[in-house]
Image (tube, rainbow, N blue to C red):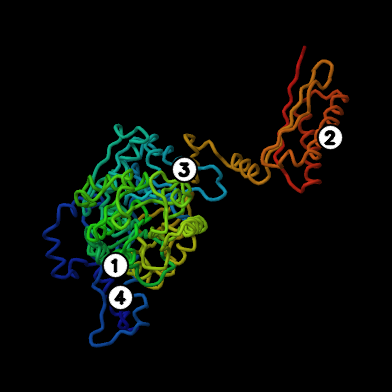
Amino acid sequence: MAECSISMAFKTKNVKKYRASSRKPQGGESKSAQKSAKQPKKENILLSQLTGGPKKQTRTAPLTVKGRAVSSEQRRRPQPQQANRGSERGSQRRTPVKIIPLGGLNEIGKNFTVIECSNDMFVIDCGLAFPDSEMLGVDIVIPDFTYIEQNRDKLRGVAITHGHEDHIGALPYFLKKFNVPVYGTRLTLGLIEGKLKEHGILEQTKLIPVEPRKTVRFGCMAVEFIRVNHSIPDAVGMAVHTPAGVIIHTGDFKVDYTPIEGSVIDLARFAELGSKGVLALMADSTNSERPGYTMSERKVGESFEKLFAKAEGKRVIIATFASNVHRIQQVVNIAARTGRKVAVSGRSMVNVITKSIELGYLKIPDGLLVDMELVSRYPSDKMCIITTGSQGEAMSALTRMARGEHRNVTITPNDFIIISANPIPGNEKFVTKVVNDLLKQGADVVYESMYEVHVSGHACQEEQKLILSLTRPKYFIPVHGEYKHLMKHAATAVSVGVPEENIIIASIGSVIETDGVDMRVTGTAPAGNILVDGLGVGDVGSIVLRDRKHLAEDGLIICFATVDRKSGEILAGPDIVSRGFVYVRESEELMETSKKLLTETLQDCLDRDMHEWNAIKTKMKDALSDYIYQKTKRNPMILPIMMEIND
């Protein structure tokens, strides 16, 4: 963002000129603007139709002070036209547009945003999140689709920014409910195809490939795809052209001026949109706490070169994210130069590499790739294995190698292992355990910050400032991050001139509404987590999780008895079965005393002619619970089972 220092008189004078040009915009246009107006592009005609006709250009050129140096302090000040952003479209209110984030806020993952206007709406991304430590037994977490179900007649499609799990992982579950087209770049759709095939819905789903700078129409709105850099190829941001104005969604992004494959992020298009007027910017907040710039992926390649030289005579094993095709390409290139064959281990890694080769995103020389079954036939110094498990996942290939359970790989002191990833928050202890197990087997292990073996795929503060400065949004909505990330990103926006009152820190389910003049949270939509456990979707809720936690912490005691209903005589039991509470053979006295207590309690109930079995079971449960806690200070789950005989 161009910034300058001027006197208050100069400010007032130019603000007046700005307002005058707003009343008579054609007289205030530059020659270049008039020239471009005479030769409108085809896509601009489409976008102008969506927003109610051609827009009058009222934005003035950035103010400058010739011959005067601008200090760093002055650069941080909001530029003069910042205060006039509210008048760029005048005071005319337009068809309202709703932005409804149903995932991806105050959390990492589960990205899912609804854009709605009149009788049309579409979804940006449809991702999953992984369960936290409280979600025992849960496989994945997906967004709540209730709001979509309530408005299914308005749904026009899904637009995907890139192929990471937190952006495409929930699509199979979504498309089973809503059969709508899915738009994305070639690699993104290639990864989606694999998921839909696993779920058996590929044939019935319409996948439509798009390219950067192309526009797709969703009813009264149009989505323009814009190239960005990320840790996976074919990532895009989006400019949503609505009747109320342009809303930019960056997706996950970084600014990499030396990408491995593809082009640099399309900063020119972001700037062009900014010069025409951006109503709102929704930007990636993941690295908002990190100052400076995110390093280029090429830095990792330079580190790999040094580490391969250091590993001379040893087998190299590299663990990284399966989706990081650029990093895999660098490993392949170095392996080819150093005379090593490459093998791939891990289901997700095999799937991504296969699809990337098929679509031309990954280039592997003929004869370089070998099957994992044949790894043992090659000398150690002629072998490189690319594997999953950089996050210490329990069933990943690297973890199985560390435990000595991998079918094709046995770790020895002749292995040089590189973990090319930083632990995701919460995974540190799992990664540490894997590293320890590998070291115990004599292998050399390079991990975390020992070398520059990993760079982030998300923008740091200076890159976030760059996007804010280029797009110059009237309103700013930080997305994709926990609350602390959103707040830090908001502070960054303020530092480059976005008014604090124009920044919206939303929550999952917030309904953000704008008419082109104002933007505010007007309500809430149904939102939350749907837990997937095996084939069950949504059948695990808070009560089930509470019971699982109880069982995990204190164990289970089952007590059962058989009673003659007519005579009231105890025919069998009460007997006790314990699981996860105490080892019965070492606690026989406790078990015997518990049986006697249950017998006395049950007999007392029968003597008092109690026939309500639920009441009897409650009495038995309470009596045993009090006794167990008194003796052990534990609260196991107690499950009484009563069987009655009528004959």
* Gap between marks 2 and 1 measured at Cα: 72 Å
* Gap between marks 2 and 4 measured at Cα: 87 Å
Front position among marks 2 and 3: 2
Q: Secondary structure at mark 1?
A: helix
Residue 203 seen from this side: yes
Residue 456 rendering spot, x and y as whole percentages: 37, 62
Amino acid, disc 2: Leu
Q: Residue 597 bears which disc, if any?
A: 2
Residue at position x 26%, y 58% from top?
Answer: 335
Say which residue label 4 marks.
15
Q: Residue 302 bears which disc, if any?
A: 1
* Gap between marks 3 and 4 measured at Cα: 47 Å
**Chain-order first, disc 2 or disc 1:** 1
**Chain-order first, disc 3 or disc 4:** 4
Q: Is residue 226 rendered to the left or right of residue 590? A: left
Question: Vertical placement of 169 versus 457: above or below?
Answer: above
Residue 71 rendering spot, x and y as whole percentages: 33, 85
Front position among marks 2 and 4: 2
Amino acid, disc 1: Glu
Front position among marks 2 and 1: 1
Residue 258 rendering spot, x and y as whole percentages: 24, 66
**Chain-order first, disc 1 or disc 3:** 3
* Gap between marks 2 and 3 measured at Cα: 47 Å
